[in-house]
Image (tube, rainbow, N blue to C red):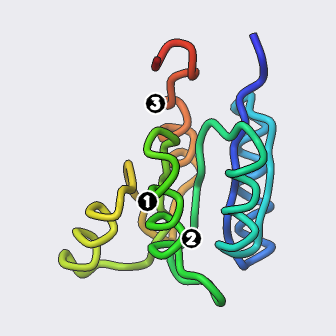
């Protein structure tokens, strides 16, 4: 079975490093992008199984990234990392197509649990 790919999108190196370590420990091949534009390119050129994305980033927000991604790809699960607590803003993220969210600050176990729920593509098809 091919290794599943996790794309981490965050403008903070420390967050990307932490989530990358968790992803590798969970058995994923880890790809990284520091903004939504890079993430879109990665999703268009690589076979990504799941995306964990920050909401607040320069150049392109997580919400804008997901909206663009969903124009061409409705299947890749996207988990949003956000400090947002406003229900209307969370609802807007769900409306653009996120599959779940984890509030910052988060515990590593939350990332492990989210990744454990991701089914391999062959099983999901």
Work out whether residue 52 or residue 109 is closer to the camera in this orientation and state it.
52
- Local SS, label 3: loop
In the rendered image, the vertical position of residue 46 relative to residue 59, given as above or below: above
In the rendered image, the vertical position of residue 121 relative to residue 76, given as above or below: above
Q: Position of residue 87 (x, y in %)?
A: 19, 75
Q: Residue at x 56, y 70 (%)?
A: 54
Q: Determine the image quadrant of residue 49.
A: top right
Work out whether residue 41 or residue 58 is closer to the camera in this orientation and state it.
41
In the rendered image, the vertical position of residue 103 relative to residue 24, given as above or below: below
- Local SS, label 2: strand
Work out whether residue 7 or residue 83 is closer to the camera in this orientation and state it.
7
Q: CA distance from mark 2 to mark 3?
A: 19 Å
The disc label shown at residue 102, or none? 1
Mark nearer the N terminus (2 vs 3) = 2
The disc label shown at residue 54, or none? 2
Work out whether residue 22 or residue 95 is closer to the camera in this orientation and state it.
95
Q: CA distance from mark 3 to mark 1?
A: 14 Å
The disc label shown at residue 117, or none? 3
Mark nearer the N terminus (3 vs 1) = 1
Q: Residue at x 65, y 88 (%)?
A: 59
Q: Determine the image quadrant of residue 60.
A: bottom right
Q: Quadrant of the N terminus?
A: top right
Q: Position of residue 119 (x, y in %)?
A: 51, 23
Tell me if mark 2 has few (under 14), some (14-19) or many (20+) residues whose alpha carbon lies within 10 angstroms of its own. many
Apparent side of residue 93 relative to residue 69 in the rendered image (left or right): left
Is the C-beta separation of discs 2 and 3 under 8 Å? no
Q: CA distance from mark 1 to mark 2?
A: 10 Å
Is the C-beta separation of discs 3 and 1 under 8 Å? no
Front tag of 1 and 2: 2
């Amino acid at each position: 079975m091919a290794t599943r790919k996790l794309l981490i999108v965050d403008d903070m190196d420390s967050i990307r490093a932490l989530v990358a370590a968790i992803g590798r420990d969970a058995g994923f091949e880890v790809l990284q992008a520091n903004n939504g534009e890079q993430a879109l390119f990665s999703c268009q050129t690589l076979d990504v199984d799941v995306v964990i994305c920050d909401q607040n980033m320069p150049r392109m927000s997580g919400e804008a990234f997901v909206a663009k991604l969903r124009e061409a790809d409705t299947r890749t699960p996207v988990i949003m990392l956000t400090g947002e607590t406003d229900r209307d803003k969370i609802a807007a993220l769900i409306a653009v197509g996120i599959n779940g969210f984890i509030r910052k600050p988060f515990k590593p176990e939350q990332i492990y649990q989210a990744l454990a729920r991701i089914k391999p593509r062959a099983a999901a098809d």
